[in-house]
Amino acid sequence: MAKRRHIPASEVGERLRRLRGNELQTRVAERLGITQAELSRYERGRVPDAAMLVHLARSYDVTVDYLLTGKHPPAPQPRVVDGRILKFERAIDRPPMREAVAVVTALFEATDRKRATELIGILKCLRDLAEDAARAGRASRQRTK
């Protein structure tokens, strides 16, 4: 039997705050159909029930697993048939990067397999750079508190 891992409620709240970004709690709460006070409680560490976790995940375009653990599912490899890429979904599971992925996906349609592999490598590097920049920003904010 797998050992259950404790999920700190404060980490769930921190992820929700990060996903909200600079948008006002009142606007996000209105969009979610909850009160600002309820959203505030979630961001301060009260873990939402299962239905609300699903609702939050869909609203922020992430998985429930990400909300609870901070881990994104592994990105699927593109499906290649006869040297052509037919499908490339969620290569980078970060909402701000979706537009970039859509543009690159369009480029993939006319690209051979070797070039597609190179482009996937570039996307992964961009994802890593974005994650490093986010970590640096969080560390900088922590030092200024």
Image (cartoon, helix red, strand yellow):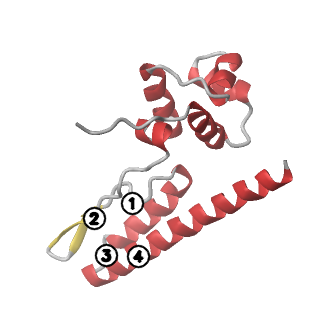
Q: Kindly state the secondary structure of the residue where label 4 is placed.
A: helix
Label 3 close to label 2 by CB (< 8 Å) = no
Task: Report x, y in % for residue 66.
Answer: 46, 42
Quadrant location of the N terminus in the rendered image:
top left
Q: Earlier in the sequence, mark 3 or mark 2?
A: 2
Q: Which residue is mark 1?
A: 91
Tell me how far mark 4 sits from mark 3, CA to CA. 17 Å
Q: Which mark is residue 78?
A: 2
Looking at the image, residue 101 sits to the left or right of residue 43; the answer is left
| Residue occupying image coordinates x 72% and y 24% | 26
- Label 1: few (<14), some (14–19) or many (≥20) C-alpha neighbours in 10 Å: many
Q: Which residue is mark 3?
A: 110
Q: Earlier in the sequence, mark 4 or mark 3?
A: 3
Q: Earlier in the sequence, mark 4 or mark 2?
A: 2
Tell me how far mark 3 sits from mark 1, CA to CA. 18 Å
| Residue occupying image coordinates x 70% and y 54% | 138
Residue furthest to the bottom in view is 114
- Label 2: few (<14), some (14–19) or many (≥20) C-alpha neighbours in 10 Å: some
